Amino acid sequence: MYTTKEAARRLDVSERRIRALIGSGDLKAQKFGGVWMVDEESVRARLQRRCSAGRPKMGEKNAENLVRCTLMSKDRPVVEFTYHRRTGQVADLKPLDGVSFAPLGIGARGKEPDKYDLASWLSARSIPDFRRNVRALLHGSRFASTAELMLDSWGLSLSDPYWLAPVGCDVQWGSINYYENGYDQTLGDFMLDVPHAAFPRTAFPRAASGKAARGMRTPDVTTAGALVKTWMRKDGVDYLVKGGAGAENREPYNELLATRLLGRILEPDEYVPYGLVERRGRVYSSCAAMTSLDWELVPAADVMTAFSITEGRDLHRSYLRALSDLGISNAQSAIDKMIVADYLMANFDRHVYNFGLLRNTEQLDWFRIAPLFDNGCGFYSRATADELRRPRYFWESHPFREYPSQQLALVEDVSWFDAARLDGFVDEVAEVLEGNSHLSDEFIEGVQRHTQRQIDAVADLAAERSGLFAGF
């Protein structure tokens, strides 16, 4: 018998990997006095299988870290490739018959998919390692990383029709996609809880052979972002439930406040409405999915990859040009409205993964602007009451300019903005934020004061632009 340390040395893997192999049944072991002892014959057999597989790719000694996958779009095979479970590298790409249905972000438009872009696209598909409760999840499961968790759940999501099929797999999209078949909510329940000791191993089903069956069927493993979140289905509608940071938990209230603001200045189809839900004494924001079987979300990051928009270029101009090339006629107006809305909210987190497009999953040249979503970092969510006491509060804007005033200057048309529709909005600021018992009256008054200042600045810009046009 080997200790886990000896088995790890002989197989050239980590002890964590040995424990995962024991948990999955791939290595035989027994526990003595709370210590795992691994069967020598089981280790030798595994070593023999690995050595007989030939020289491994990507410099990887442990061939089990490599898996041959097919990226699928529904039932269309897009590209076949080798994926490195541990590093996330991609190699040996082979475009297939359905390559025209590839995600927009896995290579330059009009060219074959690129292995580096595909690796980046896959990386963005996993839960970030720093999200709350991730370490407890991995420790309690048979997975060494969130990438493995994503891969083991087919890479399915509720944002698009893409999934990862092992080569030779005969599973069909219609039998596994979440839109038509539902999903498990055990993982989401665990990830929302604070604190939680360990993820229960019994949550992962096991096949009759004793090996663990395919991972949890949940879109939670392909939902990116730093904050805790989970998908829940109610009355046939999928809702994304998302928490806030720290004890003050500001972000859910800010999502509701953003909904109130956007409802005053935008059309209903231009933004995603959020509500609040309570779970075990903690408040979360909730919104219905904007995607469906027919429409996928294309983040701005993927548009930039497709059009080779890199740092150092004028991102605003380049992005608008790309949208024009995709046939989107209202691109300038939509981006103008996003910039104004983010200015009013003092939103510092409009990154390239939380705005973008919706694309028809069958008619690939049908695009429309995605409604505004993910506004929790607005309304001074990182400010203190002391900072808001000052005449001006500075934040860094995104994604087009660093300074909010410079980004606001990019707006061409403000004629749609009616300042009168925001009369009394600062009263709603107090109404919503007072629901959060962690916020002081002084802080809420500061948010009101600075929000009114932002409203006045946009109103002045609209009046100035109107006066200029009237002069012509």
Image (spheres, rainbow, N blue to C red):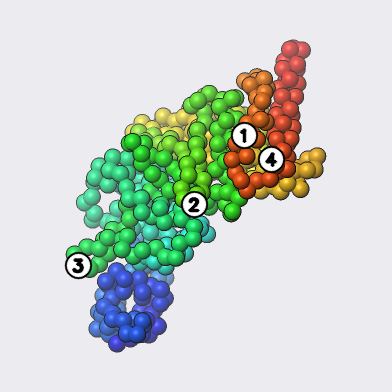
Q: Secondary structure at mark 1?
A: helix
168 vs 151, nearest the viewer: 151
Real-space Cα separation, disc 4 to disc 2, in angstroms: 25 Å
Q: Which of pointers 4 and 3 indicates the residue nearer the eye? A: 4
How many circles with numbers are drawn on the protein? 4
The residue to which callout 2 is attached is 228
Q: Which mark is residue 431?
A: 1
The amino acid marked with disc number 4 is: Ile
Q: Secondary structure at mark 3?
A: loop
Real-space Cα separation, disc 4 to disc 3, in angstroms: 59 Å
Mark 1 or mark 4: whose residue is earlier in sequence: 1
Mark 3 or mark 2: whose residue is earlier in sequence: 3
The amino acid marked with disc number 1 is: Glu
Real-space Cα separation, disc 1 to disc 2, in angstroms: 25 Å
* Residue 417 falls in image quadrant: top right
Q: Position of residue 21 (x, y in %)?
A: 32, 72
Mark 4 or mark 3: whose residue is earlier in sequence: 3
Mark 4 or mark 2: whose residue is earlier in sequence: 2
459 horizontally vs 257: left or right: right
Q: Secondary structure at mark 4?
A: helix
The amino acid marked with disc number 3 is: Ser
Q: Residue furthest left?
A: 208
The residue to which callout 3 is attached is 209
Q: Pointer 1: residues within 10 angstroms few (<14), some, or many (20+)?
A: few
Q: Secondary structure at mark 2?
A: loop
The residue to which callout 4 is attached is 444
Q: Position of residue 3 (x, y in %)?
A: 36, 85
Kindly identify the residue that appears in the image at 61 percent across and 50 percent down: 248
